[in-house]
Image (cartoon, rainbow, N blue to C red):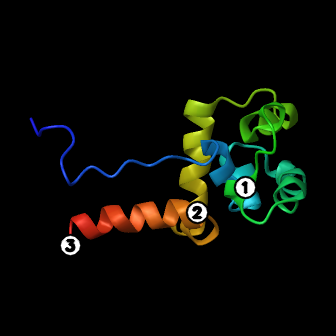
Amino acid sequence: MPACGGAAEVPFVVMHEFEGLLFSDCAAFGQGIGQPGMESEFKRIRDQFETPEDINDSPATAPSLRVVALVPSYEKPFLGTLAALQIGLESIRAECRHFATWVSRLESLVG
């Protein structure tokens, strides 16, 4: 097993939470969770912030709480994964610069 703490470890600290990244493509987000009609509501939230990573102006308005308020049946592990797959890594990277920098750093480790 590789030793912990090696030079290859690249921690990622999400500015807020995973759901913020899902606001990178509001149409795909809605489709991914089986709620295509929610696109306009997701976009309304997204448009209030410079980037999806900035969506989180208080503990009471965390991205996951915003999503659950609109879609009470939202389940992060399952539906969040489906949404991320629908949105795609390139769209998330294009909208979320901190996340994109981290992924680029990981890619540089493998050449």
Query: Which corner quadrant of the image does residue 80 belong to?
Result: top right
Q: Is residue 75 above or below residue 89?
A: above
Label 1 – label 2 distance at C-alpha: 13 Å
Say whether marks 2 and 3 touch (CB < 8 Å).
Answer: no
Q: Quadrant of the N terminus?
A: top left
Find residue 17 and report its horizontal and vertical position in percent: 63, 41
- Which mark lies nearer to you, 3 or 1? 1
Q: Which residue is at the front of the view, 108 or 40?
A: 108
Q: Amino acid at mark 3?
A: Gly
Say whether marks 3 and 1 touch (CB < 8 Å).
Answer: no
Q: Which residue is at the front of the view, 47 or 16?
A: 16
Query: Which corner quadrant of the image does residue 111 belong to?
Result: bottom left
Asked whether, in this view, residue 37 is left or right of residue 87, the answer is right
Find residue 9 and report its horizontal and vertical position in percent: 27, 49
Q: Earlier in the sequence, mark 3 or mark 1?
A: 1
Label 3 – label 1 distance at C-alpha: 31 Å
Q: Secondary structure at mark 2?
A: helix
Q: Amino acid at mark 1?
A: Asp
Say whether marks 1 and 2 touch (CB < 8 Å).
Answer: no
Q: Which residue is mark 2?
A: 92
Q: Which mark is residue 111?
A: 3
Q: Earlier in the sequence, mark 1 or mark 2?
A: 1
Find residue 8 and report its horizontal and vertical position in percent: 22, 54
Label 2 – label 3 distance at C-alpha: 22 Å
Q: Which residue is mark 1?
A: 54
Q: Secondary structure at mark 1?
A: helix
Q: Residue at x 81, y 45 (%)?
A: 57
Q: Residue extending furthest left?
A: 1
Number of numbered labels in the structure image: 3
Q: Amino acid at mark 2?
A: Ile
Dot 1: few (<14), some (14–19), or many (≥20) neighbours within 10 Å? some
